[in-house]
Amino acid sequence: MLDRSIYKKIRNIEVRTRKAVNQLFVGSYRSVFKGQGLEFHEVREYAPGDDIRLIDWNVSARLGQPYIKKFIEERQQRLVVAVDVSGSLDFGSQKQSKNETAAEIAAALAFSAIKNNDLVGLLLFSDKIEKYIPPKKGKRHVLRVIREILSQQKSSVKTDLGQALRYLNRVNRKSSIIVLISDFLAQDFQKPIRVLSKHHDLVPIVIKDRLEKTLPQLGLVNFEDPESNEIYSLDLSDQKIRAQYQAQSSNDSQTLAKFFRSLKLDHLELTCDGHYAAALTKFFKARERRIKH
């Protein structure tokens, strides 16, 4: 049985994301995530200018003249939200933890999808596959997706992003929209991302806390790695240490962004301060303009 606080969180997320979807996302969702696949519609006679690769040779031979296959864009798309639930996502110095921010982003996308009668699936992963829910339709299903994100009792705090990506490639045979939400504090995921992005519309969303970018000016502070339990002591009164930390964080973000660009992946970095809606909308509009051109 779920804790009452989880039900309250689910209700709050439903209210906040429903408003965001109605005001910001639903108008551009279809144009932002379109053309995921084609389904056979009919055959018709070949006309000059048609692509000869679409000729149906069996039908053409039977009828004595060339016919081509006609396809239409699939009306129903498949959105799979893959959420990192490893220990590092529990951190949050602002209004929300990274995990709670991931849940809201997943909810906003899921509600947008069901408004377009699309299917929504979920993968929760650490260094194990914690939970996989195949894509389905409907509000009840979306609320289950959100509930699973918020109430998941993970079996590990470590991260294996590569394993999650390989799993997604195995279970999603049809071309899908895959939104990958993680802080990307992981190793050896570059090759699996390349493979997955060849078959699916992959959209990485990087979740960061502000303290992961810039450290405040304090004294001696102990930091604990949530995935290894190692303790690190840093003197935050030392400007040089803070500057080195900020430079390394900025370099890591730039390296990750450069990698995504090399694969021509639209990606977004968000902070868990509760103000994701405007950034998501801006991202959607930029992606829509790029697709149209």
Image (cartoon, rainbow, N blue to C red):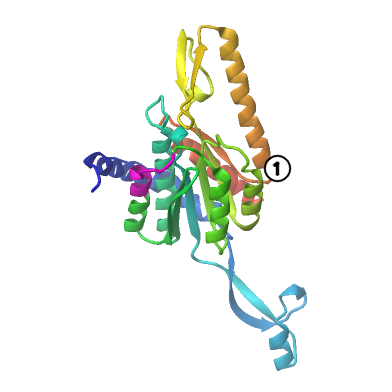
93 sits to left or right of 197: left
- Residue 198 occupies quadrant: bottom right
x and y percent of residue 199 in the render? 62, 58
Q: Position of residue 129 (x, y in %)?
A: 47, 50
Residue drawn at the location 68% of the way across and 87% of the way down: 59
Snapshot quadrant of residue 8: top left
User: Which quadrant of the figure has residue 267?
Assistant: top right
Q: Which residue is drawn at 46% across and 20% down?
A: 223
Q: Mark 1 points at which residue?
A: 262
Q: Which of 220 and 218 is in front in this view?
A: 220
Amino acid at pointer 1: Ser
Residue at 41% across, 62% down? 136
Rendered view: 46 above or below 105? below
Q: Is residue 267 visible?
A: yes
Q: Is 41 included in the stretch rendered in magenta?
A: no
153 over 178 or under it: above or below: above
Q: What stretch is highlighted in magenta?
A: 146-156
- Between 217 and 64, the one nearer to me in the picture: 217
Which residue is rendered at x = 53% and y = 52% of the image?
Answer: 178
Residue 235 position (above or below residue 95)? above
Residue 251 location, x and y as percent?
64, 26
For the question of whether residue 50 can be seen, the reply is no
Disc 1, SS: helix
Determine if the magenta segment contains residue 149: yes
Q: Which of 15 and 101 is in front in this view?
A: 101
Quick one: 63 or 107, which is closer to the camera?
107
